[in-house]
Amino acid sequence: MASAKEAGSPTVDFVVSPELVTIADHARDLGLCPECFGRLVGRYGHGLTNPERAERIASGTELPAFAPIASCALCRGGFDRWETWVERIERTARGIEWATFSCGCRWDPEILAHEELIWSKVGTPFGESARSAFNRELGKKVEQKTGKQGGSGPSDVVFVADLTVGRVELTIRPIYLTGRYVKLDRTIPQTRWPCRACKGRGCTRCDGTGKMYPTSVEELIADPVLVATQGRGTRFHGMGREDIDARMLGEGRPFVLEVLAPRVRSIDLATVNAEIGRTAAGRVEVRALAVGVPGDVTRVKEARPSKSYRVVVAGEAAREKINEALKLAVDRAIAQRTPTRVAHRRSDRVRTRRIVTADLVAVDPGRFTLELRAEAGTYIKEWVEGDGGRTEPNLSQSLGLPLHVESLDVIAIHDEET
């Protein structure tokens, strides 16, 4: 027959020391159940449950063996209704897909204060809180009943047992999808833009939609995802953003779509991507759609890659003069005060940026086309036009004539040095 250690049972490490005997003697008349008595030394040794600790202490002292009591003077029966709590958890999670979980609990503050008082009274330095013990034991029961994996780390769902009202609260953790989007439509913003007049409530200005624009990159991507996941909503995190009237071409802009409270977690990404392609045809495309992790949000939001642009500029100038101005502009510090067009929503300050490369690719009557690579955060339109002197130096100033950006495309995000 295999030993307990060979069978996978935890190694028991619990010696009834004189210190434990003293603690037990001080607690013998407090009317504690085996769980709460064992919790007085719950952080002493390992390999035993708290009721088993209580039994070991009783067998190592003159205390009588523990027997169930009608009502514990501390937890008031809080550790006696495991089946009820597991049933409530199963009922609360009905219809939701989950494979991993964690447990929490909410106790009457009076009980927790009484617990601290008892620890002080019996002089124990080993006390384990009711919350910690309850969470651990409830997790074990749920694992046994459902076959799901419990733990304290990242999980699909979190159950909170509220012992004050006898109810289970459920939190469904988000899921994260990563990818790159290509934006082909010059009339849509990256994210849902609430109406400035009604703040999203709906008014005559927005025809009751609550939005400044009928749709967005976020919504065109998120809508099929929400259908597949039965989620409550989304948060869209992009690696920067392009202007509404600019296209995002090339390999696309990296993004993370955070899906809130999804009832379905295992989705067919190929099917979802195909549906995005169908409903957003000619406006948005998604590439490299994959399941992500929470840390992807920070990675995307904090990235500061340089970007490449194609700019069509209205203005008449000789090829030689344009090339000379571009040569002088490369790697020169540019002081850009917050542009007039975004001053209403961004702090007014001066940012220093640089043009990394600049090439003239076409000269046509009345216009010319540039391809630029610039540091993250460079306002390209303002560098071309000057923005009334808020960007210094600027291309209009260098050429000595007024310029206007007719169209702007982002053609590469150099997040992987592409």
Image (cartoon, grey):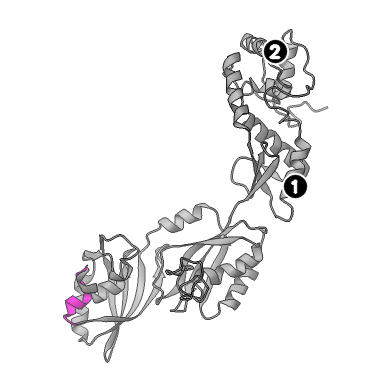
User: Vertical placement of 104 versus 1: above or below?
Assistant: below
User: Vertical placement of 252 versus 156: above or below?
Assistant: below
User: Which of 110/395 is in front?
Assistant: 110
- Of the 4 image quadrants, the one containing the C terminus is bottom left
Residue furthest bottom as drawn? 365
The answer to whether any part of residue 194 appears in the image is: yes
* Residue stretch in magenta: 391-401
Residue 56 shown left or right of residue 330 in the figure? right
- Element on which disc 2 rests: loop
Q: Answer with the quarter of the image where residue 348 lies.
A: bottom left
User: What residue sits 58% from the left and 55% below the top?
Assistant: 174
- Of the 4 image quadrants, the one containing the N terminus is top right
Residue 387 shown left or right of residue 179 in the figure? left
User: What residue sits 24% from the left and 64% below the top?
Assistant: 337
| Mark found first going from the N terminus, 2 or 1 | 2
Residue under label 1, please give it.
Answer: 90
- Element on which disc 1 rests: helix
Residue under label 2, please give it.
Answer: 29
* Total marks in image: 2
- Give percent across and percent down for residue 293: 55, 54
Given the image, on which type of amino acid does mark 1 rest?
A: Glu
Given the image, on which type of amino acid does mark 2 rest?
A: Asp
The answer to whether any part of residue 147 appears in the image is: no
Query: Rounded to the nearest whole Å, what is the CA distance between mark 2 and mark 1?
Result: 38 Å
User: Which of 203/256 is in front?
Assistant: 203
- Give percent across and percent down for residue 365: 27, 92
